[in-house]
């Protein structure tokens, strides 16, 4: 029986092969590998898609976070970096790049607990921390985990009340929305990833910064090219972080299929949700009414300490699973003595021990999906 992977990129490529091959052939013809025409076109089309004034291509989703934070530091403080006393609030239940970018921007990450129903940062915890006298807070980095929108009404309201910036980590959430506003286009800036497994993935690393703020966009563009408007004159300490022409070409070829791929993901998620909601020991996540999720991952909570055993039994049955994320950021060595926490983060710790992501390849056939659900139920019952 054919194994069921988390994501079958070969099958996705076969579906879009003609468009992708044509896009790559055009690059081979014009040979403009750095800042070629495809990069500018992709930036324009992404800005239109997200409803923002600017999109700036960068070398990775991690660089999108870091460069956006650096631009915010220069704009808000007039300094190259934040200082250690500057606090940026975020979730501990995310990929390491979120917290790492905060550290590398000079600031101190403050990890607050998550909502157990969505696994996103809990706005009530943010309000509690700020009302508790957190005078050094400068910003919030909400992560739209698994493509599920954070409560952006609450977060932007809190940010406005306390004069904080909001940088959306939308690495898993391209195509998602909160009350019909595209994620990455709601806060002061948004960071996107084009890693191959993302909703819109290239053939390597790639990322993008979205913003309506002209100054943030100007600074971000400078920081991507060694900190200057002129190639041979730098004003800021920058990076060599450009989106490759080749990757932009792949993304342009795949972009017309993005909405179709998202709808396929949502259909699969709906079938999972319906098939698993009565399964003992399995809890599905809640999608708020105002949210349009992307389901970059479809994640359930396996109760009773049975997550790893279930994953192993599914593996033996030829079904791949993944754990995002086994170790919360505040428990990682890199953040020791470099971060702060507020509260016991019990929900994040619980999620780290229970979260299990199931295959959600947009090219999955219904029979494969049924096999996953039936096998999972059988494993749970046994």
Image: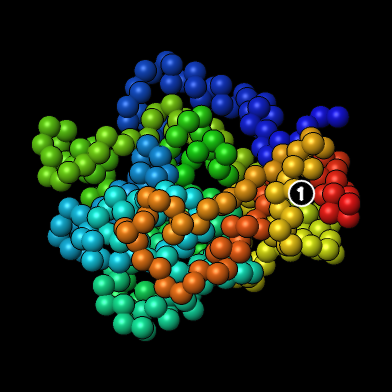
Residue lying at 49% horizontally and 79% vertically, measured from the top left: 124
In the picture shown, does residue 357 fall above or below 144?
above
Report x, y in % for residue 33. 35, 23
The quarter of the picture where residue 12 lies is top right
Depth order, front residue of 289/134: 134
Residue lying at 88% horizontally and 55% vertically, measured from the top left: 381
Residue lying at 42% horizontally and 15% vertically, measured from the top left: 29
Q: Is residue 140 visible?
A: no
Report x, y in % for residue 162. 32, 78
Report x, y in % for residue 293. 62, 58
Q: Is residue 193 left or right of residue 145?
A: left
The quarter of the picture where residue 365 lies is top right
Please give the residue where the numbered disc 1 appears in the rendered image.
Answer: 310
Report x, y in % for residue 85. 23, 66
Q: Quadrant of the N terminus?
A: top right
Q: Is residue 8 left or right of residue 74?
A: right
Q: Is residue 234 visible?
A: yes
Residue lying at 55% horizontally and 69% vertically, measured from the top left: 346
Tell me the element at label 1: helix
């Amino acid at each position: 029986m054919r194994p069921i992977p988390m994501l079958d990129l070969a099958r996705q490529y076969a579906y879009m092969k003609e468009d992708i091959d044509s896009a790559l052939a055009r690059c081979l013809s014009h040979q403009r590998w750095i800042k070629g025409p495809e990069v500018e076109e992709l930036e324009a089309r992404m800005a239109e898609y997200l409803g923002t004034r600017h999109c700036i291509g960068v070398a990775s989703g991690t660089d999108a976070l870091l460069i956006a934070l650096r631009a915010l530091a220069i704009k808000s403080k007039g300094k190259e970096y934040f200082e250690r006393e500057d606090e940026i609030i975020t979730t501990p239940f995310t990929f390491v790049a979120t917290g790492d970018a905060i550290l590398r921007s000079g600031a101190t990450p403050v990890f607050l607990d998550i909502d157990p129903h969505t696994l996103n940062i809990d706005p009530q915890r943010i309000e509690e921390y700020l009302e508790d006298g957190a005078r050094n807070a400068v910003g919030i980095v909400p992560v739209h985990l698994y493509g599920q929108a954070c409560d952006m009404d609450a977060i932007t309201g809190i940010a406005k009340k306390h004069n904080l910036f909001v940088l959306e980590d939308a690495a898993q959430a391209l195509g998602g929305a909160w009350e019909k506003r595209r994620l990455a286009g709601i806060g002061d800036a948004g960071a996107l990833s084009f890693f191959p497994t993302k909703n819109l993935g290239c053939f390597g690393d790639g990322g993008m910064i979205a913003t309506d703020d002209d100054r943030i966009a100007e600074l971000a563009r400078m920081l991507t090219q060694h900190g200057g408007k002129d190639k041979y004159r730098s004003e800021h300490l920058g990076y060599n972080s450009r989106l490759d022409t080749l990757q932009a070409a792949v993304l342009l070829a795949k972009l017309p299929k993005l909405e179709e791929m998202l709808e396929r993901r949502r259909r699969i998620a709906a079938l999972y949700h319906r098939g698993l909601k009565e399964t003992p020991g399995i809890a599905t996540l809640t999608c708020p009414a105002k949210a349009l999720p992307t389901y970059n991952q479809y994640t359930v909570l396996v109760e009773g300490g049975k997550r790893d055993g279930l994953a192993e039994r599914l593996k033996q049955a030829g079904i791949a699973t993944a754990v995002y994320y086994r170790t919360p950021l505040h428990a990682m060595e890199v953040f020791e003595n470099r971060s702060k926490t507020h509260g016991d983060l019990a929900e994040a710790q619980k999620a780290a021990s229970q979260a299990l992501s199931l295959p959600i390849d947009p090219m999955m056939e219904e029979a494969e999906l049924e096999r996953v659900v039936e096998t999972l139920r059988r494993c749970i019952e046994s």
